[in-house]
Image (cartoon, helix red, strand yellow):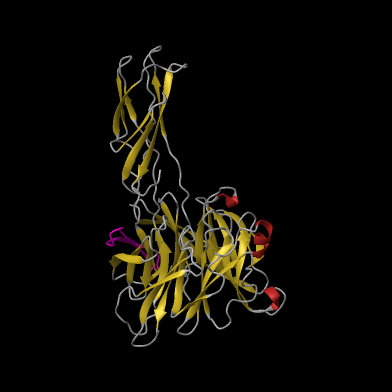
Amino acid sequence: MKFDKSRVRRIGRLFSGVALVTGIAVPLLSSPTSATSTPSLPPFGTSYVVNHSSDSITVISPQGSVVTTIKLPSGSAPNTIAISPDDTTAWVADSGSGHISEINLTTNTYFQDFPLPSGEKAVSASINTGSGYNGLGLLDVVETGASSQVVAYNIPSFTTASTYAPPLGAKDTQIAQAGDGSSFELLESCTTTSNSCPNGASGTYVQFVEPNGMVSIGNGANLVSPLGSSFSNYYLAHGDIGYTAYVAEAGTNSGQLVCTYNLSSYKSNKSETCPSNFQKPIPLAFEPTAIASSPDGNTIVVVGVHNPNTSNATDEIEVVGLNNGGTVPTKNTYTPYNTPYNGASGGESVSFSSDGKSFYVGDSTGQVSQWKLNADGTATKSANTQNISDPIAIAASYDVVPTPTFTTTLAAPGGTFTFDASNTPQPTSQIASYAWDFGDGTSATTTSPIITHNFAKPDQHGQHLVTLQVTDEEGSV
């Protein structure tokens, strides 16, 4: 059973550069924003593919070409990857070595690893950078082996922040992190018939956990009993809010997509529930093997294999739209490679870009494809990369805009000042516009980094506060 996690969502940040421009009444001075050295960040849309069998990470450009392959220590058997929102670091859960490998994304090199407690193996990991845990950056890791637990590690120090242990007799298997950091969901298997299992019944459950103190907050409202008893494998994705989850359940030659939410949270605020048009399971005509939710929770993508272990086996993608306003979600089915393959296990991984406009699919034939979501809910394959060894998990880089900086060329009183932002560190997507506020009641937006301005008179303090905001082609500021 292989696991894939949807990506955590990036919250937009506002950056500005500041300069003080002296007025006429005092000597002319200028204090431009100082530029700090910014490492070369990966272009927005760069994807990182975890190769389980070859102990490596394949780096793929936004255009679909292989940039490089990062080798991990032999025997790592990596399962999942989590990327820091500033695009500088990735952490890989190594199920074979019992380590977390750290990757430097500015140089695409293996940097170091952190050993887990003796006997523990990492099967799933997710970044928590939201405000749900006091705004701290944490790496939440599902560990199985000597015990079954979720450990929140502080990053970059990798010291333990807190630990969640499942009920007696239960075992954590997968984690899905809410984008705002308010909670995470777990798949838990419970093999005992004691009261430690919900309703005293064995099976697989969705468990909701509050990261602040690792407090369990109950089980799903729609799935208070074990998930579908006729299914054997389950794959988890978070929804658009902290207490909603989606599960792809796999049976023999078929499956279903279900939604569940935390009942106790719903009772308290009456808002966190499944979409109104998704109140019952959605049947799938193939065996699902991975699932991902878009950052806004409006699109669910399930990948899997149709007619497995036969000469007619084909991989399939189901794109499910939840925001169409209809009584039922929209469904669009795709066969990404249009060629059958014998005995293949189908799609192994799926993950969304941080802006939710595209998703990435990896399958056991060694191919990774990028798909663009269209406005009508359909998807179009935009790039395809072949000869990837074993794409068990995929993560994509974020859209990062560094703090802008500019210099000021001084002028005589009443003269023309020149502001130059050419040395602003490049975002991971190209800069589309420069928005200037001159602090005298006037502003301007240009596509050029250089602008001139005349100040009619100084303000009451003898100076003007000039600010700059840059926006990239993806709309981030």
Residue found at the far bottom of this picture: 310
Q: How far across and how far down the image is residue 441, in percent?
A: 42, 25
In magenta, the rendered stretch is 54-74
> Does residue 116 appear anywhere in the picture?
no
Q: Quadrant of residue 268?
A: bottom right
Total label count? 0
Q: Quadrant of residue 372?
A: bottom left
191 to the left or right of 47: right
Residue 126 is one of the magenta-drawn residues: no
Q: Quadrant of the C terminus?
A: top left
200 to the left or right of 328: right
Q: How far across and how far down the image is residue 8, in percent?
A: 48, 57
Q: Residue at x 46, y 52 (%)?
A: 10
Residue found at the far top of this picture: 25
Q: Residue at x 63, y 54 (%)?
A: 212
148 to the left or right of 377: right
Q: How far across and how far down the image is residue 213, in percent?
A: 65, 55
> Does residue 331 appear anywhere in the picture?
yes
Front in this rendered view, residue 412 or 437: 437
Q: Is residue 178 above or below residue 232?
A: above
Q: Is residue 105 above or below residue 186?
A: above
Q: Residue at x 68, y 62 (%)?
A: 264
Front in this rendered view, residue 99 or 246: 246
